[in-house]
């Protein structure tokens, strides 16, 4: 009798079974990261926009490009929050992310955490790129958009 743990993993089967779960779980975790970024007050990096949180400033950075010295700090902060959220998930969920990382052929170790942080960072950055920054501009006229 073969041991389930040592049996080779069929990558296609793992992706077929865990793919929808991964999408839903990453969406849930990305919302947690965004929530944490949105709860931190803005530091006033972009004077022409009235962002009230670091989430707004991070979205501004993602959409408008690199800014001297600031971009690295915002990226590091977002990655730190992604790591914190990733490390807080239950072990049984992390085991599933381990299997997903192996199925994708990710060589990093510990597989699940590194894979999860990378996926979360990409998803949060994607969400930041979709945020409407115009409404935070000083010359935004809300009544024109009714």
Image (cartoon, rainbow, N blue to C red):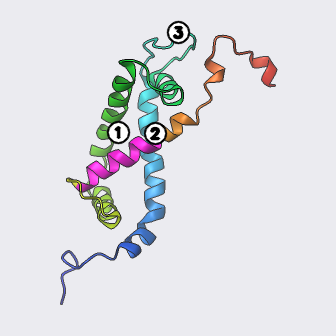
Label 2, label 1: how many angstroms apart (C-alpha)? 9 Å
Q: Are marks 2 and 1 in contact (CB under 8 Å)?
A: yes
Q: Position of residue 18 (x, y in %)?
A: 41, 66
User: Does dot 2 land on a helix, a strand or a loop?
Assistant: helix
Please report the bounds of the magenta region as a residue range: 111-124
Asked where in the image residue 92 lies, by quadrant, the reply is: bottom left
**Where is 90 relative to 45, above or below?**
below
Q: Earlier in the sequence, mark 3 or mark 1?
A: 3
Q: Using a 10 Å C-alpha cutoff, classify the residue at mark 2 as few (fewer than 14 neighbours), some (14 to 19) or many (20 or more).
A: many
Above or below: residue 109 compared with residue 67: below
Q: Main secondary structure of the magenta part?
A: helix
Of marks 3 and 1, the one in the foreground: 3
Determine the residue positioned at 24% across, 55% down: 111
Q: In the rendered image, which residue does mark 3 sit on?
A: 47
Q: Residue at x 48, y 25 (%)?
A: 61
The answer for how far apart the CA atoms under marks 2 and 3 are is 23 Å
* Residue farthest toward the bottom in the current orientation of the protein: 1
Apparent side of residue 107 relative to residue 122 in the rendered image (left or right): left
Q: Position of residue 77 (x, y in %)?
A: 34, 28
Residue 96 placed where, x, y %?
A: 32, 62
CA gap, disc 3 to disc 1? 27 Å
Q: Nearer the viewer, residue 112 or 71?
A: 71
Residue 15: x, y in percent?
41, 68
Return the disc, 2 or 1, that comes first in the chain's sequence: 1
Assign the N terminus to one quadrant of the image. bottom left
Displayed quadrant of residue 67: top left
Element type where label 1 sits in the image: helix
Residue 121 in the figure: left or right of residue 7: right
Q: Please give the residue where the numbered disc 1 appears in the rendered image.
A: 82
Instruction: Write down the residue under mark 2.
Output: 124
């Amino acid at each position: 009798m073969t041991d389930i743990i040592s049996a080779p993993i069929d990558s296609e089967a793992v992706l077929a079974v865990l793919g929808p779960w991964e999408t839903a779980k990453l969406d849930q975790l990305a919302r947690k990261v965004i929530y944490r970024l949105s709860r931190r007050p803005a530091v006033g990096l972009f004077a022409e926009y009235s962002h009230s949180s670091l989430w707004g400033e991070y979205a501004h950075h993602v959409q408008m490009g690199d800014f001297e010295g600031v971009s690295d700090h915002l990226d590091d902060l977002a990655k730190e929050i992604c790591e914190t959220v990733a490390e807080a998930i239950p072990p049984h969920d992390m085991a599933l992310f381990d299997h997903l990382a192996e199925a994708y052929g990710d060589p990093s170790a510990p597989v699940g955490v590194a894979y999860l942080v990378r996926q979360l960072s990409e998803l949060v950055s994607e969400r930041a790129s979709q945020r409407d920054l115009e409404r935070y501009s000083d010359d935004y006229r809300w009544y024109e958009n009714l």
